[in-house]
Image (cartoon, rainbow, N blue to C red):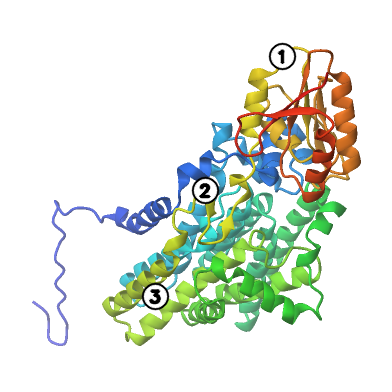
Amino acid sequence: MALPGETMVVVRPRPVDDPPPRRWRVLLGPVALVLLTLVVHDVPTAVRLPYWLDEAWVAASTRFPIGDLPVTTSSTPIGWSALLRLVPDPDWLRLLPLGFLVLSVVAAYALAAALPWPSGAHRVVAGFLAGALVALLPAQQVRHDLKQYTADAALALVLLALAGFVEATYSRRRLVLLVAAGTVGVLLSHTATLVGGCVVGGLVLAALARRQWRRAVEAAVAGLALLAVFVAVYFGLARGGDSATMVRYWKGFFPTVGELPGYLDYRLHALQPYVGVDIGLLLVLALVGVVTVGLLGRPAAAVAAGLLAPAAVAAGVARMYPLLDVRTSHFLLVWLMAFAAIGVAGLATFLARRRAVVAGALAVVLLGGYAYRAAEWFRFDGADAALGVRVPATSENTRRPVAYVWAHRRPGDVVLVSGAASYGFAFYWPAQPGYRRDRGSAVGWQPTYPDPRIVLSTGRTAAAIHTGVVTATGLAGEGAAVWVVRSHLSKVEKAAWTAELTKLTAETTPTGVESALRVVAW
């Protein structure tokens, strides 16, 4: 019994046979999102398509010793090129970008669900909404190419989620984890440096606003550590891929300050089909998402997310990174959708007066409406006349021509490879290639072969094509043939090849798109 003035508290002992807490339930949302991602993406087709020019040189780099990566990785982050070597089948290399695409969906879930919502139900709704919208985003449907762009998006969301993680319960250990993630990120993604800088900036500014001086200094030191890693990686490894040819290629995506208003208007409208809704509305909702993150007690994460768009614009104006290209700015589109989802979840929570069931119903309705709008993109197979979108892998194919020539080439025959086909040839031709440095090439190197009867064109000009044809036909003896493998031909190249082949007897082989030619030299 309780004494007068005391309160008796009755504690019911937990039965011995009570089941332990079912922690596996927290995995239901991410697992469901992974399954959703695999359903809306045509994974078999994405994996099966041959590698086109921009992918072929990345794929070809896997044929050289890992010690050659500082040269052969070129403009691709060296960590990405190293990870490709872990894929068991060389024809399945696109599993790597698909894996990071799945990671971006799970990271979006974690980013939203980790926020301190009013209840666990709110967290699940917000996390699932963010992950689902990122999975359904049209820009994600076309991003199966063998490049690091899905890693850019996934790592951006991971770093922003870690900003909230550090802020939730601050400790040096968590800050070290952020620096470690940023270090790995710099090796896998060029944009991880930009995002990491915004995250550190958010932590420093939030600490200064709260007058947490020691925390601000520690975050600044973390930022300096990330900067040191970036400088070491850039000058030690990545600078070789920053060639004059590459800069010229991207010059249309480096606006000046005066061009910026018109440039942003033009580029944003060009990207609108890849987001599925009005991009102005999406920008507003993303801003609401940033505010929501701040109101939920994560000002550092909110500032980091808010800094990302201005930082990307500044990088474009400074000619450091292409601005608003559908590939290089893929991470911005995914970031935009993730924070728009958080904004929708925040509005739903506010309008529903914190009732999770009502907020969930509103979120489901909005998710259903978006899925209906974006449905035509689902299971995108690389070419869709209705969408007016075609990825180059559906119109470029060196795999079949190379296999045909390998099977039908006879002793004494010569193989002539066009300038842009050389990387696909180096990947698909069974014999081991070599390489030579070439600063005039966009990727800084060209494949080579010790066999003199394999003639790789030195360029894509009419003069280079003429020299290649003369060399190849000169090497072919009586009764021998010259097999021609071409890919990614420009209008100038097509005209030059037509002019050269009209002088010779050439027949087309049954190898589909970009068929190989058999030229009788005598």
**Closer-to-camera residue (127/218):** 127
Q: Nearer the viewer, mark 3 or mark 2?
A: 2
The amino acid sitting under disc 1 is: Arg
- Residue 389 at x, y percent in the picture: 57, 58
Tag on residue 354?
Answer: none
Q: CA distance from mark 3 to mark 2?
A: 31 Å
User: Amino acid under label 2?
Assistant: Leu
Residue at image point 45% right, 68% down: 112
Q: Earlier in the sequence, mark 3 or mark 2?
A: 2
Q: Position of residue 219 (x, y in %)?
A: 66, 68
Disc 1 versus disc 2: distance between alpha carbons?
40 Å
| Badge 2 density bin: few <14, some 14–19, many ≥20, Cα 10 Å | many
Residue 401 visible in the picture: yes
Nearer to us in this view, 168 or 171: 168
Image quarter of the N terminus: bottom left
Among the 4 quarters of the image, the one containing residue 335? bottom right
Residue 334 image offset from top left, x and y in percent? 55, 65
| In this rendering, position of residue 343 left or right of residue 461 | left
For label 2, the residue is: 98
Which mark's residue is nearer the viewer, 1 or 2? 1
Which residue corresponds to mark 3? 117
**Residue position marked by numbered label 1 in the rendering:** 410
* Residue contact between numbered discs 1 and 2, judged by CB atoms under 8 Å: no
